[in-house]
Image (cartoon, rainbow, N blue to C red):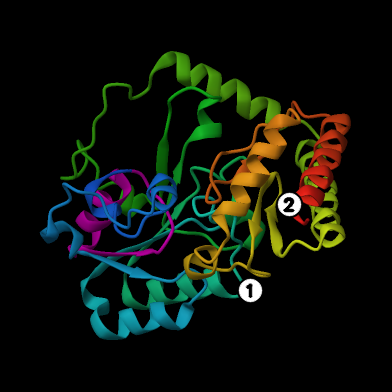
Amino acid sequence: MAAIRVARGYTGRQKILKFAGCYHGHADSLLVRAGSGAATLGVPDSAGVPEALASLTAVAEFNDLDGVRRYFEAEGDRIAAVIVEPVVGNMGVIRPEVGFLEGLRALTAQWGAVLIFDEVMTGFRVAYGGVQTLVGVQPDLTVLGKVVGGGLPLAAFGGRRAAMEMLAPVGPVYQAGTLSGNPLAVAAGLQTLELLRESGTYDRLESLGQRLEEGVREGLAAANVSGCVNRMGSMWTVFFGPPHVRDAASAGRSDTGRFGQWFRGMLERGVYLPPSQFEAAFISLAHSNEDIEATVRAAREVLATIGR
């Protein structure tokens, strides 16, 4: 919400462009074709969101650069910002296709719009510097949360000096919060970031993630269950039904009934997954090789049951 307010103040424009299935918090202008809980409940919009605000939010499909280009060609001088999860986690895990993020960077620069990466989920999870360091695309503003607070309530955003100097008291854009700079959350966040700096941290997470992905893929094939496994580092999702998921439309074709069987079967075997087809699952540094192998064994058993 604050990053978008800065973008609007910086550009003097009102409209924003987001992507179907991406969730960026529950601010009014962002609850338009959102992911996370809204996707789980099948509610495309929230009651209580004024039409006047919703009309300022344009929605494109993730991984559809041509669609974004058409929006800019139609009304590029009205678009203040493009906000995106660079790797989506709120309709299940979906990776950007080659050239998509680079294309967003080029289009926003061309039209003078602000590019916002919502790395609340991916920041310090997929890499120490987030997705942007892996793909080499630098947004104008970055939003962080979750990991940056070490499990306590904390969020942050930052970016280009010219945009950030719009914030009061330097500039005219107001931002405040009761828990801003909360010392307990800040201390937990700083300690977490120090631990993540240790050598081999992300190599270990990638190794665990790769083993889990391979095991679940093998289980799907052996049980003749249609679906796919999407993963980025320690983030992963099993989609039941479609062989490839790249956007909200393909994610929406998932077999949620079969996912329910998967969730309950895994829970019975001691593996507690997010209880929604459209939520990402995470591996943490607390997980051992033995934990991953136990999860793979459970997955194969459950998938064999589903496939009957």
Instruction: State the residue at coordinates (29%, 58%).
Output: 32
State the mark number for residue 111: none
Height in image: 224 above or below 256? below
Q: Which of these two is toward me, 281 or 115?
A: 281
Q: Residue furthest top?
A: 184
Q: Magenta stretch containing residue 87, yes or no?
A: no
Q: From the viewer's perspective, tell me whether residue 245 is left or right of residue 153.
A: right
Instruction: Please report the bounds of the magenta region as a residue range.
Output: 1-25
Label of residue 98 in the image: 1
Left or right position of 10 against 274: left
The residue to which callout 2 is attached is 306
307 or 97, which is in the foreground? 307
Q: In this view, does 101 lie above or below 236?
A: below
Task: Identify which amino acid the numbered label 2 is placed on.
Answer: Ile
The reply to whether residue 119 is visible in this rendering is: yes
Image-based side of 94 in relation to 284, left or right = left
Q: Which residue is drawn at 54% across and 73% down?
A: 100
Name the residue at 39% across, 82% down.
69
Q: Position of residue 26 (x, y in %)?
A: 30, 43
For image coordinates 83% across by 29% down, the residue present is 288
- Tell me whether circle 2 and circle 1 mark residues in contact (CB < 8 Å): no
Type of amino acid at the residue the image marks with label 1 = Val
Taking 90 as reference, is 210 left or right?
Answer: right
User: Could you say which is closer to the camera, residue 291 or residue 227?
Assistant: 227
Earlier-in-chain disc, 2 versus 1: 1
Quarter of the image where one finds residue 204: top right
Residue 265: image x %, image y %? 70, 38
Question: Residue 12: within the magenta?
Answer: yes
Q: Position of residue 101 (x, y in %)?
A: 53, 68
Q: Residue 60's spot in the image, x, y percent? A: 38, 71
